């Protein structure tokens, strides 16, 4: 079968401490309910500097400067550990400081809804001009800027959302409609942050993998936000808006929503589109969610920890036609949580892990690495959610024992060999399987592993439309090095068929 392949990946983070204070859902809710709370007063003391964010081991892992195996060498917790020689730029992307990200929000703004002060615009323009892969054309979208008095007026009189840097007002995001709640300033702010981080991820994908953006034919955007107006809430289209600024001039696209599982759904959809021949190259991209900033902040502050949910995450993955080299996406080994699966942990893992392996006559041990919900335990453990990846690996190992794929005595060694530490930021969809796809591709190409499974899970009940759970999975595998001819018939077979037809025709003429 002529499977699609993983051709490259890009991963970015944007450090946004002021957005934690002003735009994170936990903080916004606290201000509405208890504006004088001790938590809000204490919170600013727990924000990290850009240097601390860059040197943080999980963040260096996310952008590819250290590997998951390297991360394992740092003793948990990691919040007080640093990576020596840490760099904002990595193998897969970068960690962007807040001022540049605010500038990028203005650059991606197509309706002049972002207003930045003259002083800030001049400063951030210089910063972005030194950026390694943001083009002059994009930077040219930063105009002169506004008087700060005009920005304050928009905030005080028209409900605009303030943009802050180092706790100083530097701009605002205007509402896009007077009464449409779907276009109010808060929602537009969230959506522009998604778009900006998605664009940065797409640009990183192109830059880090030497991709011709004109080769991309379709884009699937899979963040947790949705854009639209009162007549079509969530109608989209983030995908095409990101494609426009990433230079994907030959692409169209659409959005896929599935809470945390959306990225893995999107990878499967992209693989199917390429394998079917509809498109040759598809990019799956996801931007970050401002609502998730400081989501577990109360628990972190209570325990004297820094606010670790201070970054927006983004990623982009290129899936293309089989080239005989890059790892293949086994669309015949797709796991899915169906309507009738049930929600017990064993039922979920069975449907996502063992059911697809059974179809391929594979054991659990045939998968070298499982990439599950790669949540950072530094974030989840203080909040009472435990070590999410380890919990998943324990369940997979337990099923392995039940199936007699491994012995009970091998439980711990299985987790050590086939699992990984979690390193992804808490952005819901960002940790869900896909953080390993860049590393997984490299590990397979280098011959370190042969197979990996990407597992995405989601909580559909959050939308209040169903109590169902959700999840899908897919296996990535070493390319056997054979590329089937189109339509399943090789050139040699065609020549043979023509020769046989000519011989039969000649025989027929002789008989006449």
Image (cartoon, grey):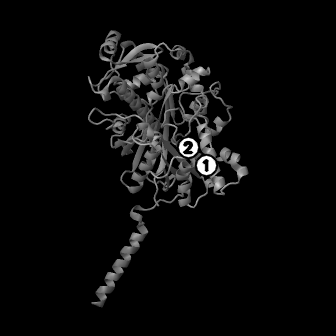
The quarter holding residue 170 reads top left
Q: Earlier in the sequence, mark 2 or mark 1?
A: 2
Q: Position of residue 93 (x, y in %)?
A: 50, 34
Q: Name the outermost residue toward the right.
A: 409
Q: Which residue is mark 2?
A: 372
The structure residue drawn at horizontal position 32% and vertical position 21%, both measured from the top left corner, is 174
Picture layout, residue 17 above or below residue 433: above
* Quarter location, residue 121: top left
Q: Find residue 190 and report its horizontal and vertical position in percent.
A: 39, 28
**What residue do we see at 43% from left, 17% from top?**
164
Q: Are marks 2 and 1 in contact (CB under 8 Å)?
A: yes
Horizontal arrangement in the rendering, residue 185 relative to residue 461 (left or right): left
Residue 99, given in percent of the width and then of the height, sits at 45, 20
Give the residue pinned by disc 1.
Answer: 396
User: Could you tell me residue 282's position as x and y percent?
Assistant: 40, 46
Kindly report the distance in space between the C-alpha atoms of the residues bearing marks 2 and 1. 10 Å
Q: Which mark is residue 122?
A: none
């Amino acid at each position: 079968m002529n499977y699609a392949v993983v051709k490259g990946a890009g991963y970015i983070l944007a450090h946004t401490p002021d957005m934690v204070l002003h735009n994170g859902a936990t903080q916004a809710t606290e201000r509405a309910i208890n504006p004088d709370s001790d938590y809000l007063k204490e919170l600013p003391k727990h924000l990290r500097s850009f240097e601390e964010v860059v040197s943080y081991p999980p963040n260096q892992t996310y952008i590819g400067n250290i590997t998951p195996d390297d991360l394992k060498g740092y003793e948990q917790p990691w919040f007080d550990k640093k990576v020596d020689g840490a760099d904002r730029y990595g193998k897969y992307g970068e960690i962007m400081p807040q001022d540049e990200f605010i500038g990028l929000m203005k650059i991606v703004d197509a309706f002049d809804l972002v207003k930045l002060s003259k002083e800030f615009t001049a400063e951030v323009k210089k910063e972005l001009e030194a950026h390694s892969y943001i083009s002059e054309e994009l930077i040219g979208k930063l105009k002169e800027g506004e008087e700060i008095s005009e920005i304050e007026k928009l905030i005080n009189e028209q409900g605009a959302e303030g943009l802050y840097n180092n706790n100083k007002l530097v701009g605002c995001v205007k509402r896009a409609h007077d009464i449409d709640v779907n276009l109010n300033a808060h929602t537009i702010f969230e959506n522009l942050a998604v778009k900006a981080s998605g664009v940065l991820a797409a640009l990183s994908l192109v830059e880090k993998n030497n991709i011709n953006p004109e080769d991309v034919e379709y884009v699937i955007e899979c963040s947790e936000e949705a854009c639209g107006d009162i007549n079509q809430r969530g109608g989209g289209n983030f995908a095409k808006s990101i494609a426009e600024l990433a230079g994907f001039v030959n692409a169209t696209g659409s959005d896929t929503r599935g809470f945390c599982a959306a990225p893995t759904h999107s990878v499967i959809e992209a693989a199917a589109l390429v394998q079917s021949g509809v498109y040759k190259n598809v990019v799956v991209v996801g931007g970050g969610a401002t609502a998730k900033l400081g989501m577990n902040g109360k628990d972190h502050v209570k325990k004297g920890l820094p606010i670790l949910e201070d970054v927006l995450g983004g990623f982009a993955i290129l899936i293309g036609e089989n080239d005989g080299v890059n790892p293949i996406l086994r669309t015949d080994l797709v796991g899915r949580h169906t309507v009738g699966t049930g929600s017990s942990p064993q039922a979920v893992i069975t449907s996502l892990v063992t059911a697809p392996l059974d179809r391929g006559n594979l054991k659990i041990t045939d998968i070298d690495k499982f990439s599950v919900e790669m949540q950072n335990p530094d974030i989840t453990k203080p909040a009472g959610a435990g070590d999410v990846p380890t919990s998943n690996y324990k369940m997979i190992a337990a099923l392995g024992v039940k199936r007699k794929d491994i012995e009970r005595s091998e439980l711990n060694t299985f987790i050590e060999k086939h699992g990984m530490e979690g390193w992804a930021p808490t952005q819901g969809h960002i940790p869900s399987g896909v953080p390993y796809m860049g590393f997984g591709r490299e590990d397979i190409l280098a011959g370190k592993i042969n197979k990996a499974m990407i597992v995405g899970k989601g909580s559909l009940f959050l939308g209040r439309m169903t109590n169902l759970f959700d999840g899908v999975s897919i296996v990535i595998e070493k390319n056997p090095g054979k590329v089937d001819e189109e339509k399943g018939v090789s050139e040699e077979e065609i020549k043979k068929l023509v020769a046989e037809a000519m011989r039969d025709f000649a025989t027929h003429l002789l008989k006449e």
